[in-house]
């Protein structure tokens, strides 16, 4: 990367949370501190468990004049290629206790379903996966290969969830959903607790205090699970910044209003896993007071960022980051190029920024397409 390169990238919207009040105990009580402890004990004893790498985007930190940019590489999470492996599979094990007469079911944009399918396969359970018309065939195929029965529904994610609930009630299947709603909270709490394991690993992987963390959000499970991990494992609380697609900024709109707000998604983002119109109930109880800022971004720079990660423009290592791995990188670059936002976030030469590389080439067809497109833009 050229040292003098100016990206010219823009943030769509940036807000500050006027209700910020980070209280460790309160955050942990929302998803259950016992669940957080349990998730670590159980998952770290799974066969082939290893911490995913905590990489340094050393070339980018030099360019942006920041002390360090850490990148948690979830492309290496078991063989599932995303952080979601920690949530759904853990919830399957906790809820079913391996009882083979239980059939588990879920609705998914892809990665959560992969985790539930794998969790069911590990324990020899039947598994039903509901997907919308926007989930790629490549993603469906991966879940089929993990032994799941994949059912495609006309309409969006919400429609697939509705059908999952209907059929599960009819046939007595156990729903393993990462989204919470009135009366359905325990399983989402488990998936969030599973995600907190990433933060425990990070706290063991560096001695440097993280000053800023950028957390992607769809329904907010990954972000709130990570925040529970921060409350539990980090000595100092970093600035917490939520990143969403501009077309599905439900956390931003909710934080801005101080109450949950539903978004009518007009155009699905390429960041499929984050294209969600409504924050989940349990995550919201954590997010509303624990995030400092929210950012929304367009899809414009996704392909280029995928290529920059792969072509070692940002780090010494080649990084395989899928569409949902890019928003942290994109928003950090754009934030540093906006004088007002950079100052407001106090991003400077002392900053140690943590970015979540949420997924690898979980959708191989889309990944190849983005990489090719992005590589052309780099020339
Ligand atoms: C692949 C993928 N799916 C989904 C999500 C969204 O997670 P959640 O719906 O828990 O906020 C993310 C990251 O935010 C992601 O990287």
Image (cartoon, rainbow, N blue to C red):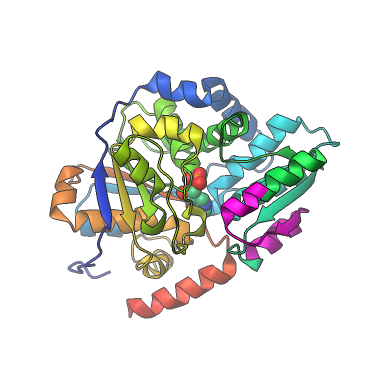
Give the image location of residue 39, x and y in percent: 59, 30
- Say above or below: 210 vs 23: below
User: Does residue 35 appear in this view?
Assistant: yes
Q: How many marks?
A: 0
Residue at 41% in and 19% down = 25
| One can see residue 61 in this view | no
- Choose between 73 and 142: the one closer to the eye: 142
* Residue closest to the far right: 101
Which residue: 66% across, 43% down? 48
Quarter of the image where the N terminus is located: bottom left
In the image, the segment drawn in magenta is: 138-162
Q: Is residue 287 left or right of residue 123?
A: left
Quarter containing the C terminus: bottom left
Residue 54 rendering spot, x and y as whole percentages: 43, 46
Residue 149 percent across, percent down from the top left:
77, 55
Horizontally, is 288 left or right of 97 in the view? left
Q: Is residue 128 magenta?
A: no
Q: Position of residue 285 (x, y in %)?
A: 43, 30
Residue 179: image quadrant is top right
Give the residue at x 75% y 39%. 169
The quadrant in which residue 307 appears is bottom left
Of the pair 373 and 61, the residue shown nearer to us? 373
Residue found at x 49% / y 61%: 322
| 237 on left or right of 73 | left
């Amino acid at each position: 990367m050229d040292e003098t390169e100016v990206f010219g990238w823009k943030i769509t919207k940036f807000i500050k949370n006027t209700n910020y009040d980070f209280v460790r105990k309160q955050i942990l009580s929302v998803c259950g501190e016992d669940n957080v402890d349990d998730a670590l004990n159980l998952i770290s004893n799974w066969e082939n468990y290893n911490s995913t790498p905590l990489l340094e985007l050393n070339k980018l930190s030099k360019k942006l004049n920041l002390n360090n940019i850490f990148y948690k590489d979830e492309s290496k999470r078991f063989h599932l290629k995303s952080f979601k492996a920690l949530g759904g599979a853990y919830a399957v094990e906790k809820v079913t206790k391996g009882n083979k007469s239980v059939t588990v079911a879920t609705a998914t944009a892809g990665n959560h379903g992969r985790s539930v399918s794998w969790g069911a396969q590990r324990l020899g359970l039947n598994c039903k996966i509901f997907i919308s018309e926007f989930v790629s065939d490549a993603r469906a195929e991966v879940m089929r290969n993990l032994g799941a029965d994949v059912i495609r529904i006309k309409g969006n994610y919400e429609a697939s969830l509705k059908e999952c609930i209907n059929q599960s009630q009819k046939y007595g299947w156990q729903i393993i959903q990462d989204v919470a709603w009135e009366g359905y909270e325990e399983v989402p709490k488990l998936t969030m607790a599973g995600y907190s394991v990433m933060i425990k690993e990070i706290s063991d992987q560096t001695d440097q205090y993280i000053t800023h963390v950028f957390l992607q959000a769809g329904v907010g499970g990954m972000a709130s699970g990570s925040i529970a991990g921060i409350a539990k494992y980090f000595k100092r609380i970093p600035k917490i910044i939520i990143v969403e697609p501009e077309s599905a900024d439900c956390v931003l709109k909710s934080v801005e209003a101080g109450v949950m707000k539903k978004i009518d998604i007009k155009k699905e983002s390429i960041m499929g896993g984050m294209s969600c119109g409504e924050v989940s109930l349990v995550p919201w109880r954590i997010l509303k007071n624990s995030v400092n800022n929210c950012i929304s971004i367009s899809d414009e720079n996704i392909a280029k960022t995928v290529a920059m990660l792969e072509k070692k423009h940002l780090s010494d290592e080649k990084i395989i980051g899928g569409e949902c791995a890019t928003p942290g990188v994109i928003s950090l670059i754009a934030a540093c190029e906006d004088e007002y936002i950079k100052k407001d976030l106090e991003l400077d030469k002392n900053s140690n920024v943590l970015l979540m590389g949420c997924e690898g080439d979980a959708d191989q067809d889309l990944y190849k397409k983005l990489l090719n497109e992005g590589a052309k833009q780099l020339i």
